[in-house]
Image (tube, rainbow, N blue to C red):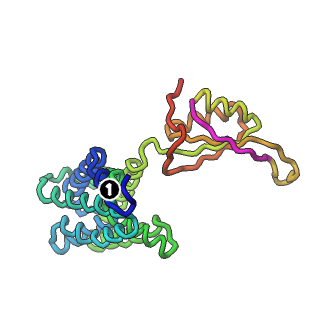
Amino acid sequence: MSHPDSIDWKRIFSPGSMIFTVVGVLSAIVALKGFMIPNHFIDGGITGIAILISSKLDIKIGILLVALNLPFIFIGYLRIGKTFAVQTTLSMILLVVGLNFISIPMITNDNILIALFGGFFIGLAIGFIIRAGGVLDGLEVIGHYTNKKSGFSTGEVVMVINTIVILAAAVYFGKEAAMYSILTYFTAMRISDYVADGFEEYTALTVLSEKHENIKSIIVNDFNKAISVFKGERGYLPGSFNVKHDCDIIMTIVTRLELHRIKEAILMEDPNAFVYITSIKEVKGGIIKQKVKH
C-alpha cells in the first residue's frame, strides 16, 4: 500500500482503472463531437463553459477543457490527493488527444435525441472516470472545496454554477437550446450516478415489528441476507405516551433490485411493521452479496 501523500502509480495504471479511463474518454468524445458541439448543446459545468467559449471565440475545445480545468486539478491535488490529480490529468490529456485525432461526424440533428443521447454518453464518461479515480469536470472539485468553506452542500454549489451556465446558453444559443441543455444535464447526471455508484446501489432497510423473530428469519433464511439487530423500544405514541414495548430493530443492506421483494415479504408477514429505507453510497466489509435461494 502506498503512502497517502505519494502517487499510487500501480492503481492509476491498473487494468481496471485504465479500462474505465479509456471507455470514459471515448464516451465523452462521442458525446461532444457526435451530439453536443455541432448542435450547440451543453450539459453544465466546465464542459458547458468550454463549449460556450469555443463557439464564440473559435478556440479548440480540447485546449479550453485543459485550461479551464487546470485550477481545479490543482485544488484537487491540494485537497484530495496526488493520485487523484494525476488520474484526472491523464483523463484530460487522453480527452484532448482524442478530440484532436478521432473524427466523429454529427450523428443526428434531432433535438430530443441530441439531449438524451448526448447526456447519456457524457454521463457514461463522468461515471467511468469517477470509477477510475478522477474527474472529467473540475466543477465537482470546486463544489467539494466550496462546501467546506461556505457551508453550502456540493450539490447546491454545482446547481448554482450550472444555473449560470444554462442562463448563458440561453443568451448565446437561444431559449430553446438552453431548455434542451437542461434535459442533457439531467440525463448526464442520472447516468453518471448509475455508473459511479453501480446499478446495484446499496440501500439500508430497517424494520421495527412485533414479529421481529419471523422478520429475522425471512431476511436471513429466505433471502440469504445478513442482518444487524439493535435493542430498542416501540410505542410512545400521541395519546398513549406511557405505552411501550421492547423490540428488536432489524437492519440489513440490500440492493435496489432486491428491495421490493424483501419489503413485500416483510409486510406480508406483518402489515403493521414500521419499515424505513435509507440510501447509502458505499458498503465495505461484512456479508453483502449472497446468492438468493429462490
Mark 1 sits on what residue?
8
Q: Is residue 231 magenta?
A: yes
Question: Residue 195 appears at what percent x and percent y?
Answer: 38, 48
Instruction: Report the residue at 52% width, 28% height from top.
Output: 292
Q: Identify which amino acid the numbered label 1 is placed on.
A: Asp
Question: Closer to the camera, 122 or 292?
Answer: 292
Quarter assignment of residue 172:
bottom left
Q: Main secondary structure of the magenta part?
A: strand
User: Viewed as shown, does residue 17 lie left or right of 234?
Assistant: left
Q: Position of residue 96 (x, y in %)?
A: 18, 61
Residue 240: where, in percent of width, then height? 87, 51
> In the visual, does 249 lie left or right of 104?
right
Range of residues picked out in magenta = 224-234
Q: What residue occupies the far top of the structure in this picture?
A: 294
Query: What residue is drawn where x is 59% and y is 34%?
Result: 262
Q: Which SS class for mark 1? A: loop
Q: How far from the left and from the top, in percent, is residue 216?
A: 67, 33
